[in-house]
Amino acid sequence: MPVLVFVESAEGKVKKTSLEAVAYAHAMGQGVTAIALGNVDKEELEALGTYGAQKVLHASDSKLNDGIIQAYASVLVKALQDEQADILVLANSSLGTPVAARVAAKISASLASNVVELPNTSAGFAVKRSIYTGKAFMQVELKNQKKVIGIKKNAAEAKAVGLPVQATPYAVTLNDADFAVKITSSEKATGEVLLPEANIVVSGGRGMKGPEHWGILEELAKTLHAATGCSKPVSDMHWRPHHEHVGQTGVKVAPQLYIAVGISGAIQHLAGVNSSKCIVVINKDADAPFFKAADYGIVGDAFDVVPKLTAAIKAIK
Amino acid sequence: MKILVCITHVPDTTSKINFTDNNTRFNTAGVQFIIGPYDDYSLARAIEIKEATPGATVTVLNVGPADTEPTIRKALSVGADDAVRINAEPTDSFFVAKQIAEHAKSIGYDLILMGRESIDYNSGVVHGIVGELLGWPSVSPVMKLDIEGTKAKLAREIEGGKEFLEVNLPFVAGCQEPIAEWKIPNMRGIMSARTKPLKVVEPVSVDSGVKLQQFELPPPKGAVKMIAADNVAELVTLLKNEAKVL
Ligand SMILES: Cc1cc2nc3c(=O)[nH]c(=O)nc-3n(C[C@H](O)[C@H](O)[C@H](O)COP(=O)(O)OP(=O)(O)OC[C@H]3O[C@@H](n4cnc5c(N)ncnc54)[C@H](O)[C@@H]3O)c2cc1C
């Protein structure tokens, strides 16, 4: 019985976090069917095979181009039935998480979000999930036969394990009631590395003194192919867009490297970055609490250190 | 218009997280409890909508044992009209969602708001399950919400941006900032909250599909390595060769 994976995409491209979901399902060892909705590039669909899907379904109805939670949930429930799959795996995201909720409610599945490791099936079926905004974990048993598993970034490593597969068109009958929510317009940052997907994040706080000084952080981010983030006061003051706000009440990131510049390291900010593999802190105050949560620290003025750091990285590239 | 706001009773964001009883229970010793920050945003927006809409009411609901009542009173003190406590220790998201949906059916609300997730278990799914159980649309994470008659205009956050949406009432929304600013209770609010109705309702029984086995704390962080500000090249070397993240 295969595991079904919901593959999220944006502008025709599969999200990196969804490749991790395919890798996660592949590692479960019972076969993987991936399903993508709406407009997705052909090569992107085929590449899902490379990451571990045996079968790729593509529901290409243009009504599914927009991420409508209810409609997505209905399509996934139908696909679970058609594939005779008991388990749905997806990457937690602003769309994936609410979709998981509705799917689980429709099929009476056991549901877990923010899962960080492969299931433990030595006795029953248990998963480890991140709780208290990264400050703890909990091991839970998923008792129902049907299960919906949302994974947190880095729960599995996306790597090439197979060959590309031809996507199968997946015809669905859409129900008007599922389209009660209408998307009228959107504002999207284009060409940037998305914060939740980034391997490296360069983040700035109030110590940057104003939006006009973000250029040095953007330059560092560009050099590292990193996303830019910020602390809450920075987005509250509209120095940076809200979707860059990292922390307890913002985006939770889990990059390989998080570089914090002019951020004091309040516990609410740390809650959003504590799953990072490596943390670098640059702050002019040697007593800034962030140093206690860091792997590497530099006490210094951001306006002096950051350009030097960018130059030093360029020098080794 | 009847608005229901569902709130969680969670440890203050500065709390140290610890467990007792062989890592099967959260250690509440010395912990301050607050309204979940996301729920608090949804509450603030609900009060604003009420103030702008003649005849509108705001009811707050919490699924929890009696010790959550101070948190519920806090919600009343910033302007909610009345409260309901479903008298149960919440076991999982489905349990909580089922209690909310059953209560909502018995009253008939026009709008249900809550935070996009709780800050204890961070599941982010209760709004979706409630929506499904009621057969209503659900939207999350909502960062802007305006009601125009029987219709709502919303913005929701997506990775790297936002989308603007329209939906008819009734629906469920999981909210986050900057939907409204947190409200701070004043003395009059605190006094009047003491006498506002807080109804205690017994839970419906639910078969939970998720069972806690154990809590776990992450391993302690190693000591920070400090590098001189005039030696940035050393940091780059360490990131490359020691941390292996470049
Ligand atoms: C319920 C709740 C939820 C919250 N959620 C979040 C959240 O999700 N995310 C979040 O970030 N915050 C959150 N906060 C706010 C949090 O408590 C802090 O207020 C906030 O993180 C501080 O932001 P900051 O570090 O940018 O600013 P500050 O605390 O003002 O720190 C600025 C830092 O910059 C340094 N600095 C100044 N000039 C320079 C320079 N030239 N070079 C180098 N360093 C310099 C200073 O030494 C200082 O350490 C929350 C608070 C509450 C109560």
Image: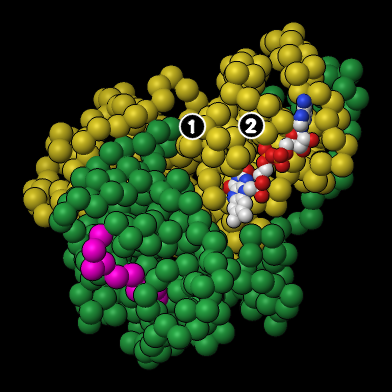
Residue that appears at 47% across and 79% down: B192
Q: Secondary structure at mark 1?
A: loop
Horizontal side, residue B8 vs residue B169: left or right: right
Magenta region: which residues?
A: B53-61
Q: Nearer the viewer, residue B5 or A273?
A: B5
Give the quadrant of ligand 1: top right
Q: Nearer the viewer, residue A170 or B138?
A: B138
N-terminal of the pair, mark 1 or mark 2, is 2
Of all chains in the rendering, the one displayed in green is B
Res. A73 visible in picture: no
Tell me whether marks 1 and 2 sit on the same chain. yes
Horizontal side, residue A253 vs residue A103: left or right: right
Horizontal side, residue A164 vs residue A232: left or right: left
Q: Secondary structure at mark 2?
A: strand
* Mark in the foreground, 1 or 2: 1
Residue lying furthest front = B188
Residue that appears at 87% across and 42% down: A287
Residue that appears at 55% across and 29% down: A239
Q: Colour of chain A?
A: yellow
Image x and y of residue A300, in percent: 84, 26
Mark 2: few, some, or many residues within 10 Å (few <14, many ≥20)? many
- Please name the residue that numbered disc 1 is placed on: A241
Q: Is residue A109 above or below residue A188?
A: below
